[in-house]
Image (cartoon, rainbow, N blue to C red):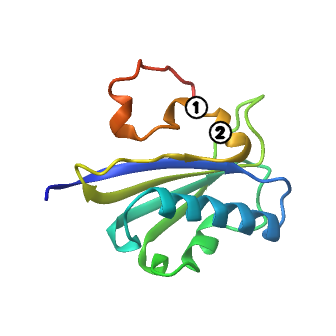
Amino acid sequence: MEWQMRAIRGATTVSENTVEAMREVVTELLDELENRNQFQPTDMISVTFSVTRDLDAIFPAAIARARPGWDNVAMLDVQQMHVEGSLQRCIRFLIHAYLPTSASIHHIYLRNAASLRPDWSLPQSLQTSQPTVKSKV
């Protein structure tokens, strides 16, 4: 089986800037990531989380590190660049992982963040036959 480094993106939104609310949505996002993509934390190289400037109650990486196997993954939290009129209270991730070249990639966009990339609601392997959708995201 041939493996290559692949990237998986995802995002969600949170209703309020509290530890409890952020823990709920980050857990939901990462549960969906693990359920829809067939890989283990040991396959991951790194994870970058970004949050909009209105979120500062907890680092998303701190939530992720509490998950089984995630404590040895290199993670970084950053603040998303602010653009007037952009989606508020948004948490995004970018994961780099070694995966089989034949594996389908499922990018995870939940809650209000689903509007960011509706074109990525299908596995990446099916998108090659889809028309290109331009996005400012």
Indicate the position of residue 117 as horizontal and vertical percent values. Answer: 57, 33
Q: Closer to the camera, 80 or 129?
A: 129
What's the residue type where badge 2 is placed?
A: Ala
Under tag 2, what secondary structure?
helix
Residue 16 falls in image quadrant: bottom right
Name the residue located 52 percent from the left edge and 63 percent from the top edge. Answer: 76
Tell me: residue 97, above or below residue 108: below
The structure residue drawn at horizontal position 55% and vertical position 78%, both measured from the top left corner, is 67
Q: Which mark is residue 118?
A: 1
Quick one: label 1, few (<14), some, or many (20+) residues within 10 Å? Answer: few
The image quadrant where one finds the N terminus is: bottom left
Callout 1 amino acid? Pro
Q: Is residue 36 above or below residue 44?
A: above
- Residue 27 on image: x %, y %: 65, 67
The spot of residue 51 in percent (x, y) is 67, 52
Look at the numbered disc 1 and give the secondary structure of its residue: helix
Alpha carbons under labels 2 and 1: distance apart = 6 Å
For residue 44, side relative to residue 69 (left or right): left
Decide if residue 84 is on the left or right side of residue 32.
right
Q: Are marks 2 and 1 in contact (CB under 8 Å)?
A: yes
Asked whether, in this view, residue 50 is left or right of residue 47, the answer is: right
The image shows residue 71 at horizontal and vertical percentages of: 48, 80
Residue 114's disc is 2
10 Å crowding of disc 2: few (<14), some (14-19), many (20+): some
Q: Tell me if residue 107 comes above or below residue 74 in the rendering.
A: above
Quadrant hosting residue 24 = bottom right
Residue drawn at x 39%, y 47% as measured from the top left: 105
